[in-house]
Image (spheres, rainbow, N blue to C red):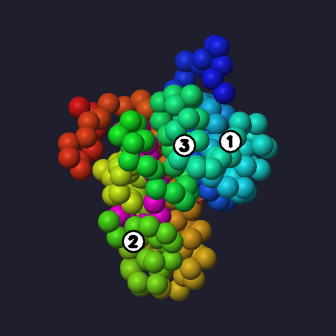
Amino acid sequence: MHGLFQSRLPRIVVLASGNGSNFQTIAEKSISGKLGAQIECLIVDRECFALERALKLGIESHILKKPWYEDFERVTDEIAPDLIVLAGFMRIIPENMVKKYFPRIVNIHPSLLPAFPGKDGINQAFEYGVKITGITIHFVDSGVDTGPIIFQKAIEVDEKWTLNELEERIHKLEHEHYWRIIRKILYEPYKIEGRKVLWGV
Ligand code: GRF
């Protein structure tokens, strides 16, 4: 995990619980050099498809032991990453970790926050019948999907789309933008004033 000769690149960990398509895109951009960061480890809280992706990509992975939050703290502190990237991690980050790492934990959510936080954001928006939805990338605070917003992208919902079609579009947006925003956080100056993320200051 923590080699003797550390890379000069920023080091990140990615946390996932499921499919891992966002992890895969970030990992591919890391491997191709476009991300400008090295993924030290994929951390998961359960057996999931993301693990298979990590194996194929040659990225180290770790399944959290119970209680997950203690193991999460231990593993993360040991790696001491520059950024913790949540990509479909289905747990709330404990207060002590938020305090220790803020603003170095980021999350992606598949709706335009503060609309439709929590689970199944895409389905919630679809069922609500919104005409516009999108994605939000934000710093993680101790609430559920409440941290300062870094980036949002909206799309218009075509009335003819099925839930699956909307999901596909949302995931495409996520894959297009998450890695770019991660790179931006790692390389461009910003400050956080209250809820506002201000760039270039
Ligand atoms: C994404 O829609 C993300 O916004 C949400 O969980 C989903 C994870 O998808 N937080 P995947 O596991 O990256 O395919």
Q: CA distance from mark 2 to mark 1?
A: 30 Å
Task: Give the amino acid type for the residue marked by disc 1 in the picture.
Answer: His
Could you tell me which secondary element the residue under label 1 belongs to? Answer: strand
User: Upstream in the sequence, badge 1 or badge 3?
Assistant: 1
Q: Which residues are magenta?
A: 103-113
Residue sticking out furthest to the front: 67
Residue 49 can be seen in this image: yes
Which image quarter has ligand 1?
bottom right
Residue at the disc numbered 2? 116
Task: Give the amino acid type for the residue marked by disc 3 in the picture.
Answer: Glu
Residue at the disc numbered 1? 62
Q: Is residue 177 above or below residue 183?
A: below
User: Upstream in the sequence, badge 2 or badge 1?
Assistant: 1
Placement of the N terminus among the 4 image quadrants: top right
Placement of the C terminus among the 4 image quadrants: top left
Q: Residue at x 37, y 65 (%)?
A: 112
Q: Is residue 124 above or below residue 78?
A: below
Numbered badge on residue 146:
none
Identify which residue, 114 or 153, lies in the foreground: 114
The picture places residue 68, in percent across and down from the top left corner, at 58, 49
Report crowding for label 3: few under 14, some 14 to 19, many 20 or more residues within 10 A (C-alpha): few
Q: Is residue 51 magenta?
A: no
Q: Is residue 110 magenta?
A: yes
